[in-house]
Structures are given as structure tokens and as C-alpha cells.
Amino acid sequence: MSQIEKLLAQFKNNPKNVNFTDLVKVCNHYFGEPRQQGSSHCVYKTSWAGNPRVNIQEKNGIAKVYQVKQVLEAIEKIEEMEDD
């Protein structure tokens, strides 16, 4: 099991108290480098229409729970698109 897979499993089991740098690693793996960074936000572009971005934000070194859930949903969508 790769480091990314381990992190994803941790996020799914407990989306609270997710280390922001771990979330960035996972997002970089699935979405590439963020189109915006340097502030407390990182914005990633996705490959579908509609709301084609993933926005994550750091607060005291921890990622926000709702944003972790959004990242997990976006990853599921990517994996579904790859299966088609």
C-alpha cells in the first residue's frame, strides 16, 4: 500500500484532524500542482465542468473537515471517470 493510499484510508476513517500537509500531498497526486498557493488556501483545477476546482485551507496546521470530504468526493469522481 502506497503512502497516498494510506493517507486516503486515514482521511476516510476520520476526516477530522487531517494534517494539512498530508492533504496537500494527496491533492498534488490526484490534481497536480495547485493553480493558487502561498496564502492559507490551495486551489486545484479538476477536469470536469461545473465547479471545476478543489479549494483547501489550513487552520492551525489542520485541514477543514468539509474540505477533506470535498477532496474525497472529487477523488471518487476521478476514479469513476477512469473506470468508464
Image (cartoon, grey):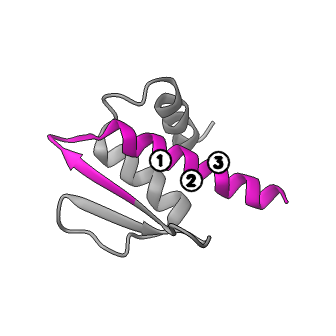
Q: Contact, CB < 8 Å: mark 2 with mark 1? A: yes
Look at the numbered disc 3 and give the secondary structure of its residue: helix
Tag on residue 74?
2
Q: Is residue 65 magenta?
A: yes
> Residue 64: horizontal and vertical position, in percent?
30, 40
Q: Residue furthest front?
A: 50
Which of the pair 46/33 is nearer the observer?
46
Q: Is residue 58 magenta?
A: yes
Q: Report the Cα–Cα distance between label 2 and label 3.
A: 5 Å
Q: Residue furthest right?
A: 84
Location of the N terminus (image quadrant):
top right
The amino acid beneath tag 1 is Gln
- In this picture, residue 24 sits left or right of residue 1: left
Identify the residue at image location x=18%, y=58%: 40
Look at the numbered disc 1 and give the secondary structure of its residue: helix
Identify the residue at image location x=56%, y=69%: 50
The amino acid beneath tag 2 is Ala
Q: Main secondary structure of the magenta part?
A: helix
- In this picture, residue 54 sits left or right of residue 50: left
Q: Report the Cα–Cα distance between label 1 and label 3.
A: 10 Å
Tag on residue 76?
3
Look at the numbered disc 2 and give the secondary structure of its residue: helix
> Residue 4: horizontal and vertical position, in percent?
53, 44
Q: Which residue is mark 1?
A: 70
The amino acid beneath tag 3 is Glu
Identify the residue at image location x=38%, y=40%: 66
